[in-house]
Amino acid sequence: MAIPGSDLNVRHPPSAVPGRRFEEFVVGARIAHARTLTVTQEENAAFCRLTLNNQPLHLDAAAARAAGYPGILVNGLFTFSACVGASVEETTAGTLVANLGYENVEHPNPVFPGDTLRFSTEVVATRPSSKPGRGVVTLQHTAHNQAGVEVCRFKRIVMVKAGTP
């Protein structure tokens, strides 16, 4: 599906479903996502505007330095959202029924404009749903910067389609 005006255009044949069905999720499986992201201050500022967040640490270099940082910090929710987004193609695209929740969201280290993030996912649990044709999967998502330092981690609980298409 193409996203107009975006560099995230991904094209698939009309019948292709790149995501995984419940039976394809194996506990312990790890996915190193191909998609990476180099964060710009323009993207960070736009995210802050869209989410009504005027926190000076994300927008004002002097305020960030006064707080002890070398410069502006990227909004943690931007990092979190990018981590989810980078995983969709290889996990839930076309198979997601619902995002049921997120747990233990942590930002162990800051992200700065110019950092390049890479993303990975581990399947940590699966269980059948009480509703037919569906299953519940718990995914552990992580993001690392260009130096390999972990900058975000959390669990995402999803309900996905089960069975054959």
Image (cartoon, helix red, strand yellow):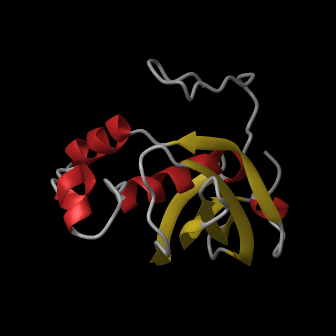
Q: Using the image, determine if residue 75 lies above or below residue 149.
A: above
User: How far across and down, in percent of the image, does residue 84 sit?
Assistant: 54, 55
Give the camera-side residue of 45 and 81.
45
Let me know if residue 53 appears in the view: no
Quadrant where the N terminus is found in the figure: top right
Question: Residue at coordinates 49% horizontally, 69% vertically from top-left?
Answer: 100
Looking at the image, residue 17 sits to the left or right of residue 68; the answer is right
Looking at the image, residue 125 sits to the left or right of residue 6; the answer is right
Q: In which quarter of the image is residue 135?
A: bottom right
User: How far across and down, in percent of the image, does residue 96 sit?
Assistant: 60, 53
User: How far across and down, in percent of the image, does residue 115 sit?
Assistant: 52, 48
Give the camera-side residue of 69 and 143.
69
Give the camera-side residue of 112 and 132.
112
Total of numbered circles in the picture? 0
User: How far across and down, in percent of the image, does residue 162 sit?
Assistant: 74, 59
Question: Residue at coordinates 55% horizontally, 55% vertically from top-left?
Answer: 83
Quadrant where the C terminus is found in the figure: top right
Q: Using the image, determine if residue 61 lies above or below residue 155.
A: above
Question: Residue at coordinates 70% horizontally, 53% vertically from top-left?
Answer: 91
Question: Residue at coordinates 60% horizontally, 47% vertically from top-left?
Answer: 86
Q: Using the image, determine if residue 43 lies above or below residue 69.
A: above
Q: Quadrant of residue 119?
A: bottom right
Let me know if residue 102 appears in the view: yes
